[in-house]
Image (cartoon, helix red, strand yellow):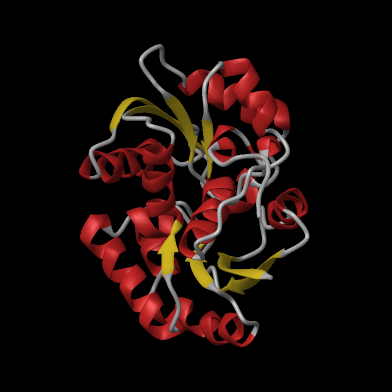
Amino acid sequence: MTALGFLYPGHCGEDDYPRIEQLLGSDIRVDLVHTDIGEDALGVDALRAMGSPQRLEAGTAELRLAGADAVVWACTSGGFVHGWEGAQQQVRDLARTAGLPASSTSFAFVHAAREIGARRVAIGATYPNDVAELFADFLRTAGIETVAAVGSGTVTAAEAATWTESEVLALARSADHPDAEAVLLPNTALHTAAHIPLLEKELGKPVLTANQVTVWECLRLADRRVNAPELGALFTREPVVQV
């Protein structure tokens, strides 16, 4: 059994995780611990506070006791708003506190884009434009060029969690660019796990979504690779037949 541990802020799009667990196989367990979200606002100050060491530390003991093989801070904006160095320190602190391999959704996007060979991407964000630009800056530091970035102006995670499939598809379409090798949808409050096949079919290219890459990153940390085409191109890098 491979046990994946996630620290998830509040209660918004977390039902993506049991859906993803069902698609991964019976020997993979997904465990979520909900962290205190504080103020539900997609502004820089509130997002920095959301990912504070104290809030993340509060959930790590439960994941460790549950037997997690690795832990990921399942929040994109709560990582990249600290900048590259700040996000790295956040992950180092998490790994030390949990005593486990650790990462965050921000770095999951970087590693996933590299996995599929995407050097130029488009961003379709539910965030305000200034926060979306911070994500583009974060990717740029990793050597990933953002050729287009669209922010929807949504100001709370709770609002993003209400988006329908048609709204998610409209966001992805509005963000897409002919030069983009992949489209990134960076918000773990956004329900996307059920929509990835449609998104990739409509856009004709890989689509990386926050909860999808978060789970993939935790699998990577646990040294476990899975072929699960219903989770998109990112999950088709391994042979269908697995030992």
Residue 114, relative to residue 79: is it above or below? above
Q: Residue furthest top?
A: 178
Q: Is residue 84 left or right of residue 190?
A: left
Choose between 135 and 104: the one closer to the eye.
104
Q: Position of residue 81 (x, y in %)?
A: 33, 55
- Is residue 76 among the parts visible in the rendering? yes
Q: Where is residue 54 in the image (x, y as percent from the top left)?
A: 42, 82
Question: Which quarter of the rendering shows the C terminus?
Answer: bottom right
Choose between 24 and 209: the one closer to the eye.
24
Q: Residue at x 37, y 30 (%)?
A: 118
Q: Is residue 107 left or right of residue 67?
A: left
What number of labels is visible?
A: 0
Q: Residue at x 46, y 23 (%)?
A: 175
- Is residue 38 among the parts visible in the rendering? no
Q: Is residue 170 left or right of residue 222?
A: right
Among the 4 quarters of the image, the one containing residue 129: top left
Q: Where is residue 161 in the image (x, y as percent from the top left)?
A: 66, 47
Residue 124, relative to residue 225: is it above or below? above
Q: Which residue is drawn at 70% across and 25% down?
A: 166
